[in-house]
Amino acid sequence: MRHVCQFSCGAASALATKLTLQENDPKDVLIINAFIKEEHEDNRRFLKDCEEWFGHPILVLRDEKYGASTDEVWRRKRFMKGLNGAPCSLEIKRKILNSVKQEGDLVILGLTCDEQDRFDRLCDHFSEEASSFRVPLIERGINKEHCLSVIKKIGLELPLMYRLGYDNANCIGCVKGGQAYWQNIRADFPERFEEIKKIQESIGPGAGFLAFRSGPRKKQRMMLSELPEGRGNMKQEPGFECGPFCEVLADDLINIRLMDKE
């Protein structure tokens, strides 16, 4: 039986992987990572640091069909985000990670105790596979803040995206982020913002993944070209993750519910 840790270059998956290695024979542990072209390059530095911390190699997998690029997925699929999540996570994360899957594997996920509802939805959706999922952080009541604290205390430098104030080490410009997130991306990575805006405009209005919060167009799709000026507070928006099960864990209505409360 293999314990397959899905390492995303994030703090939670790093701690979940370390706990798995401590509790099992390292020979029975496989650590896998999906390379994504649009992630910040500092993620690769963090991966190497974690590899040393683990004392165990990480198998880096890379999609070839789309060149491991979110942009290429969006261009060829002609959409960026739907009710079931983002096509990029399915095509260049989940499919490539599943390519090494073997019968009997235990899949180690870096979901934290504040994501219990996400894990429950995942198990409901994949009911036949639910028994193969392990969530060591949930089992121990460890939340995201605890993960960040542990990584800092052991002397590992978090990926740059965390240090810039983002909640995770996702791609630079994740379609699951809200308005404040995208305002900060525009301020911190203007060239990347413009690149994604052009892809969105080439697809058309259906590629809008944000929504107006007030006014005559409330709840209607907003394009990046219509994003209000300024730099919003990302802490006031719902958290989001990008992982191999992104399309299952998506909850596009949460932003609408927040809008209604304003």
Image (cartoon, grey):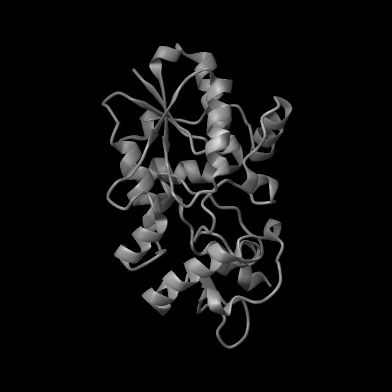
Could you tell me which quadrant the C terminus lies in? Answer: bottom right
Direction from residue 80 to residue 225 in the image, left or right: right
**Residue in the picture at 65% in, 34% down:** 147
Q: Is residue 231 above or below residue 235?
A: below
Rendered image quadrant of residue 131: top left
**Residue in the picture at 69% in, 50% down:** 164
**Residue in the picture at 54% in, 21% down:** 54
- Residue 45 position, x and y percent, is 56, 35
The foreground one among 168 and 212 is: 168
- Residue 119 position, x and y percent, is 48, 41
Q: Is residue 139 visible?
A: no
The foreground one among 12 and 251 is: 12
Counting labels gives: 0
Q: Is residue 250 above or below residue 160?
A: below
Q: In this view, does 66 lie above or below 233?
A: above
Direction from residue 172 to residue 161 in the image, left or right: right
Q: Can residue 103 be seen in this view?
A: yes
Direction from residue 103 to residue 247 in the image, left or right: right
Could you tell me which quadrant the N terminus lies in? Answer: top left
Direction from residue 200 to residue 211 in the image, left or right: right
- Residue 71 position, x and y percent, is 40, 60
Which residue is most to the bottom? 216
**Residue in the picture at 60% in, 27% down:** 140
